[in-house]
Amino acid sequence: ILNGTGVNGKGVHGHAIHHVSVNGTLYPAKVKSRRQRWEVKPSEMANNTLNPIRAIVDGMKLTPNPDKPMIALSIGDPTVFGNLPTDGSVLQAMKDAIDSQKYNGYAPSVGYLKSRQAVANFCSCPEAPLEAEDVILTSGCSQAIDLAISVLCNPGDNILVPCPGFSLYKTLAVSMGIKVKLYNLLPEKSWEVDLQHMESLIDERTSCIIVTNPSNPCGSVFTKEHLQKILKVASRHCVPILADEIYSDMVSCSCPSMASLSSDVPILSCGGLAKRWLVPGWRMGWILIHDRNNVFGSEIRQGLVKLSQRILGACSIVQGALESILNNTPQSFYNKTISFLKSNSEICFNELSTIPGLNPIMPSGAMYLMVGIDLEHFPDFKNDVDFTERLVTEQSVFCLPASAFEYPNFFRIVVTVPEEMMLEACSRIREFCQRHYRDAAELDQSDCMDLVA
């Protein structure tokens, strides 16, 4: 309600300040000049958000050979081809949660206490015990990583990220004004960390070291001894670790958690249902807070609670099913998945190992295999992006160029496709390489002809 007479019926109460009467209360409102035209711009955060994979793939000319059905070995989603369904017990847990009608409302932003306790019980071990208060439930592992980076880092800080590594780390960090420093993984050592290089990157603004084990995109699994060496680096410089362990039980060898080996380094471990239970679309992740020496204290925990309140957490129905999923999924389901991935990895590695110009590196976990390209023997191509683009054009096989992981002259293969499709893809890659490969004699002859010309 506008009181046109203002105070004392004069309409103006000194100093050109109008008054608005709302329910009998007067609020001063300064006269502001209106905008002359529309000017709505995206925020700096939006402008600074870039997914390196999309940046490269969107620029590729991906026109498959019309005579060959497309085989996509590029998508890190185990459900795409339908050959890896989740277990019946997992589906039943979800059906029961829905039928109970108990989980249709908002859950606490950090998750239901009962669900957090179920995760704590499932992930706890004598070397790294967990309670419900040490668990934050999130909308997928990607939100867990987002919250972990957000709580540890300020604009102007830097984080250490593996190279090659999962592109999301950089996407999130750069959008927040956090600098990314890439530490090298060594392909000749099954993608172990170059510890000397890692340590050389640490300075007073380094707020965390991200360790991905098992690795996306490499499929590698660090040994206990190597993880202990990484922890020593972090301990020497008093830098916490963000452990991305979403693939931790998708391995064909021993894979201890970082927290189980740490005596003093505080760790935020990120995981979830997506990969081991083959349900990435259900968006259920978690952060496990390992802080036995109380380095994080209450402030980091409270920070995570506050950040989780921005979107009110993970899906309540999946939370309702979580205890049953964790406790009732049969070991045979996990074994079957691991056996399939191991077999497919071996098929792919063995097939590609015999192709001149390619150098596959045998994985030990996750769902990926990295392949090096001897580009000097493929003079038709400028780089890995060019190589993989032409592989689509000629053979309708799409592998992700490792430039998307800031690691040129490699490509990544996802090994979750059906076995017959994997064999067909390898056959087509062989045909492609045979067409374009040039041995040393051919290259020398070509060089001589260039000189003559």
Image: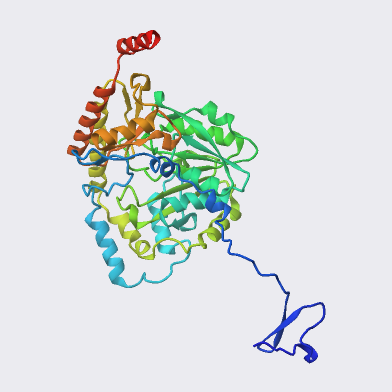
Asked if residue 105 is positioned above or below residue 331 in the image, the reply reads below
Residue 354 relative to residue 57: left or right: left
- Quarter of the image that includes the C terminus: top left
**Residue furthest out toward the right:** 14
Q: Nearer the viewer, residue 53 or 385?
A: 385
Residue 140 quadrant:
bottom left
Question: How far across and down, in percent of the image, does residue 51 sit?
Answer: 45, 45
Q: Nearer the viewer, residue 395 or 143?
A: 395
Above or below — where is 443 with respect to 287? Answer: above
Furthest-bottom residue in view? 9
Count of picture labels:
0
Looking at the image, is 261 positioned above or below residue 431?
A: below
Q: On the picture, is 431 further left or further right than 116?
A: left
Q: Look at 61% across and 43% down and name the residue there.
A: 157
Q: Residue at x 27, y 25 (%)?
A: 433
Percent from the top left, x then y, of residue 391?
Answer: 29, 33
Q: Pinpoint residue 369: horizontal percent, then vertical percent.
A: 32, 33
Q: Nearer the viewer, residue 254 or 402?
A: 402
Furthest-front residue in view?
Answer: 453
Q: Is residue 389 visible?
A: yes
Please indicate, yes or no, whether residue 364 appears anywhere in the rendered image. Answer: no
In the displayed structure, does residue 408 sit left or right of residue 78? Answer: right
Q: Residue 207 is drawn in which quadrant?
A: top right
Quadrant of the image for the N terminus? bottom right
Q: Nearer the viewer, residue 106 or 416?
A: 416
Which residue is depicted at the point 33% across and 44% down?
A: 76
Q: Quadrant of residue 217?
A: top left
Q: How is the image coloured?
A: rainbow
